[in-house]
């Protein structure tokens, strides 16, 4: 392999300039590996969209070169796009045991489990994939079995941190592998791509243990039932809930589909240790005294259909919250969810529950490194080149400031966009041309069939609704045979606006008659005429601009 | 006036269990006064709605009893509903000078200025209004000339705090009137309604002066132009910007309609003191060296059409932000606006601006009292009954906890809902029956013509769009004369889904032919048949549920 002909290209296909849908390709000659295949939840403007994934056109075009997908951990923003990826590109998937456990359920749903090769990886044990050797190193994060990758390439070693924090008192006793990071640093690291989620946050992220203490305190004070909601994937926190329950003599029932699934997978694989008899069936909640029960639930983000939200609205099938119950919301609202969480809290207070939520410190800690930890990572690894990833622009920028502070040459730091190629050759780095890349919207079964025009129409429809105007004209002389009928949806109450719609009807009739008498006969002109006249009239009368859909039939 | 027959009713018509649209009626016998007539911005689910105001049916039914509207200050959540109120109920409006100055512009826009009696009130000077005597007291808040009211009623004195904080170093030298509050407390206060916005926030809200220091520091370090965005109504902060500009030898240009309006009103009325020559026309910005200019702008919430947002997108007509310019966003994002503000910050960073925003402490302080100030208010006024207002449920609840801590009897604290009557008679309080009340949505010129069905339709349309199916049948034998034509909006790209729509067409044709052959001829059955068959087919194919609008014409 000649170093002079080939170069290493690192291509982020998602996760830069944004939070979510993390995916990075490492390309050298005829070999490509992909790290993470994440999804992202839609922005507010993406009306009706379920999830968002990276555009993988580039990878599909080069699918024969791809040696495997390497997953850092089991969160949706790192594994959620995997089924869509595997439908196009069937390659082995490498991940730690728990991550594979979570991936399996996902692939089963998409009928991909039998056709996919899943390979368990172990920290510190290198995997050959084409010219690359990928060695996982253990990280701390808000889900167990999280790793980063040291990727040995013909150009040098690249450290891909993945999501991380440094938790010196980890709940599962698994420490981040500082020795391996330091050893890599000592050996020499060509470039590092590092998690920027909390780059704006000063200090050091608190240990997950802190949450355990808060849970303990809440359990000590609770006199009736305890309902605790958190992220279904935060198995450390879930472990601590079980431990508190055991300590205070309570049984644990689990509600919410993802919580049930994750706990099953984690117990099966040994990532969650539960004393026999502690876990009870959700149907048995009411058989026990109130002070002997903990209900572990989804819904910490106030999601409309989640278990906690339904309990707060008193529409949950199995759990009715009673005055005096303690509800612990052990998470922070993800930006955009604040209002939903607040609404849930208000409803719970109204029922008479005692609610412990984010205003209480220690009820949640982040899974991502704050500034001091980012500097610790930089100081251990001491990379020559530095690329902040997993963050919006201002976070990436802040992370570079931190890197420069630890000694990285400012000229060796790159803020990149999705699709940019970071080219490394003979120890030099440059930003090359962009590969095909972008965002694919998924709505129901449709992958990529909703684009800007459809979204623009949904936006218009959502603002002022639609008016459909139907009229049948005679083929012979253009006289109106039937209609105009005006049907409105999402515009005004028909009953309260009869007069408005009657006048609108007259406007349409008048416009059509005038145009026909002027010998206008092309449908498109007639439609435009009707649309413009009606739109003007409605705007004058209501200051609204509903979508107007004229339908002219000829018989 | 016999105390035994009549009672005092205090009726919050908005602002309890929510943030915004503050409005409270005080009713005694044949006399009613209204405090504040606020608006609220729509929740996310209220698609297409512009603003939300309280339902004033109760007041309209009793309009002859209403002796006046008293306004606490000039923020939209206290005065924004006034034009809609005055269109139904023409009564005198009492407010301080600045508040009236801001009200005037609003009434002029609605052609109400000439027909409305506006009366200036002065702190400590009582106003007779029926049986009530209303005495304003000076508050600190994020807009000058803010007052609360001591309302003398036949049942006793009620303190209505309005929005407040305690700023011991106020920018305009106007201190909150602690003497009057203490004197009221000493005399005996029957009940207090107090601002709960920050009831969850521990400690004492910082003085507005702190922001002045941060602005000064930023001005000292800025090498090129300074663009500062804040709330257009925060005249204290705007005053401090002018003072910093004068200190550092910069001229100030103002952009953004509301900023220009408010500054004009405030300068005219003497609430903003500007050294001659400091204010320049926005057209002259480019005539001065970059280090001699400050641009004061709207857009601190990332609002789509605001001046700062357009600058960040490089689409502002007059101001182009250059690398090296300093942008100060002197506000906190209102819940729900975080994403818009973040997007603006990212765009500004990309242009190369230095951006100072909320992560820097001291760039914004709240206008509302934190817990220690709420307790200070309670300790000064020492009310017998306590009603927390201006807050969501959990804030009201927290505020009661604080009140009980200062010595209010827990049985004398009431959490009320919109429309509840707090009835006070012979020194006793109880919650009476509800009056007609609720929420009115305003969309364009329509007040209250958009309700649940319209919103539900807008929601449906926004998720999966609409399919209109048009077909003309023969009156004689039900054969299809024309169509079915399927028109879709917001569903899928037609070009990419031709096959799907062709199949849909066949489904409709088949369904109609089958039904006609079975002698089904009522339109409603035909429509339901088409809708159901098509809906089932589309859900199977796409997992989406667009609205389906079958239109059957007979000729």
Image: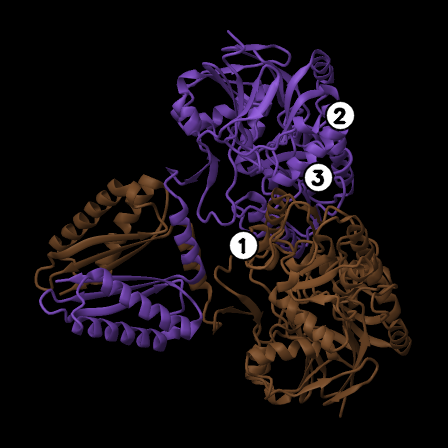
Chain colours: A purple, B brown
x, y percent for residue A265: 55, 25
Q: Earlier in the sequence, mark 2 or mark 3?
A: 3
Q: Chain of mark 2?
A: A
* Chain containing mark 1: B
Q: Residues within 10 Å of mark 1 (few under 14, many from 20)?
A: few
- Of residues B436 and A80, the one nearer the viewer is A80
Tag in front: 1 or 3: 1
Disc 3 element: loop
- Look at 86% across and 69% down and name the residue there: B173
- Which residue position holds label 2? A407
Nearest to the observer: residue A386 or residue B550: A386
Between A89 and A74, which is closer to the camera in this rendering? A89
Q: Quadrant of residue B58?
A: bottom right
Q: Quadrant of the N terminus of chain B?
A: bottom right
Up the image or down, B204 lies above or below B491; here it is below
Co-location on one chain, circles 1 and 2: no
> Badge 3: how crowded within 10 Å, few (<14), some, or many (20+)?
some
Mark whose residue sits in front, 1 or 2? 1
Q: Residue furthest bottom?
A: B1
Spot the residue most to the top: A1
Seen in the picture, residue A53 relative to B176 is either above or below; the reply is: above
Residue in the foreground of this view, choosing between A270 and A387: A387
Above or below, B191 relative to A224? below
- What residue is disc 3 on? A200
Residue B199 occupies which quadrant of the picture?
Answer: bottom right
Judged from the image, the secondary structure of the residue bearing numbered disc 2 is loop
Can see residue B297? no
Give the numbered dot on residue A308.
none
Asked if disc 1 and disc 2 are in contact, CB closer than 8 Å, the reply is no
Q: Residue drawn at (10%, 69%), measured in percent from left and top?
A: A477
Residue A288: % across, % down: 65, 39
Residue matched to label 1: B315
């Amino acid at each position: 392999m000649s170093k002079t002909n080939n170069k290493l290209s690192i291509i982020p296909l998602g996760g830069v300039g944004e939070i979510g849908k993390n995916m990075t390709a490492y390309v050298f000659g005829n070999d490509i590996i992909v790290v993470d295949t994440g999804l992202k939840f839609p922005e507010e403007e993406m009306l009706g969209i379920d999830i968002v994934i990276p555009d993988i056109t580039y990878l599909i075009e080069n699918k024969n070169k791809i040696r495997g997908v390497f997953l850092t951990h089991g969160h949706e923003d790192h594994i959620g796009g995997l089924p869509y990826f595997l439908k196009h590109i069937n390659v082995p998937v490498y991940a730690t045991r728990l991550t594979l456990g979570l991936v399996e359920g996902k692939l089963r749903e998409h009928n991909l489990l039998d056709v996919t090769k899943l390979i368990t990886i172990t920290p510190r044990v290198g995997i050959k994939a084409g010219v690359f050797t990928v060695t996982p190193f253990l990280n701390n994060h808000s889900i167990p079995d999280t790793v980063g990758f040291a990727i040995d390439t013909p150009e040098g070693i690249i450290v891909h941190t993945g999501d991380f924090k440094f938790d010196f008192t980890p709940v599962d006793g698994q420490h981040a592998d500082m020795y391996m990071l330091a050893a890599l640093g000592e050996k020499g690291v060509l470039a590092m791509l590092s998690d920027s989620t909390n780059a704006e946050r000063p200090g050091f992220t608190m240990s997950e243990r802190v949450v355990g203490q808060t849970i303990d305190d809440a359990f000590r004070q609770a006199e009736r039932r305890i309902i605790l909601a958190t992220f279904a994937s935060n198995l450390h926190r879930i472990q601590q809930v079980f431990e508190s329950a055991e300590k205070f003599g309570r049984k644990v029932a689990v509600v919410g589909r993802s919580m049930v699934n994750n706990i099953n997978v984690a117990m099966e694989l040994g990532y969650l240790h539960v004393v026999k008899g502690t876990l009870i069936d959700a149907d048995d909640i009411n058989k026990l005294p109130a002070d002997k029960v903990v209900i572990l639930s989804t819904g910490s983000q106030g999601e409309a259909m989640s278990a906690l939200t339904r309990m707060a609205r008193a529409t949950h099938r199995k759990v009715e919250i009673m005055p005096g119950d303690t509800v612990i919301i052990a998470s922070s609202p993800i930006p955009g969810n604040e209002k939903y969480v607040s609404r849930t809290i208000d409803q719970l207070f109204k029922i008479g529950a005692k609610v412990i939520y984010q205003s209480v410190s220690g009820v949640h800690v982040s899974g991502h490194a704050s500034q001091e930890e980012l500097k610790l990572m930089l100081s251990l690894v001491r990379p020559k080149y530095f690329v902040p990833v997993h963050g919006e622009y201002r976070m990436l920028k802040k992370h570079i400031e931190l890197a420069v502070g630890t000694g990285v040459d400012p000229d060796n730091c790159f803020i990149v966009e999705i699709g940019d190629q970071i080219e490394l050759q003979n120890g030099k780095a440059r930003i090359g041309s962009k590969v095909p890349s972008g965002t694919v919207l998924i709505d129901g079964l449709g992958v990529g069939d909703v684009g800007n025009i459809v979204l623009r129409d949904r936006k218009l429809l959502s603002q002022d609704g639609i008016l459909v105007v139907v009229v049948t004209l005679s083929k012979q002389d253009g006289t109106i045979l039937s209609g105009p009928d005006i049907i409105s949806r999402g515009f005004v109450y028909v009953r309260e606006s009869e007069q408005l719609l009657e006048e609108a009807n007259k406007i349409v009739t008048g416009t059509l008659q005038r145009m026909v008498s002027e010998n206008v006969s092309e449908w498109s002109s007639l439609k435009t005429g009707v649309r413009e006249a009606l739109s003007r009239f409605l705007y004058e009368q209501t200051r609204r601009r509903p979508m107007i859909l004229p339908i002219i039939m000829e018989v």
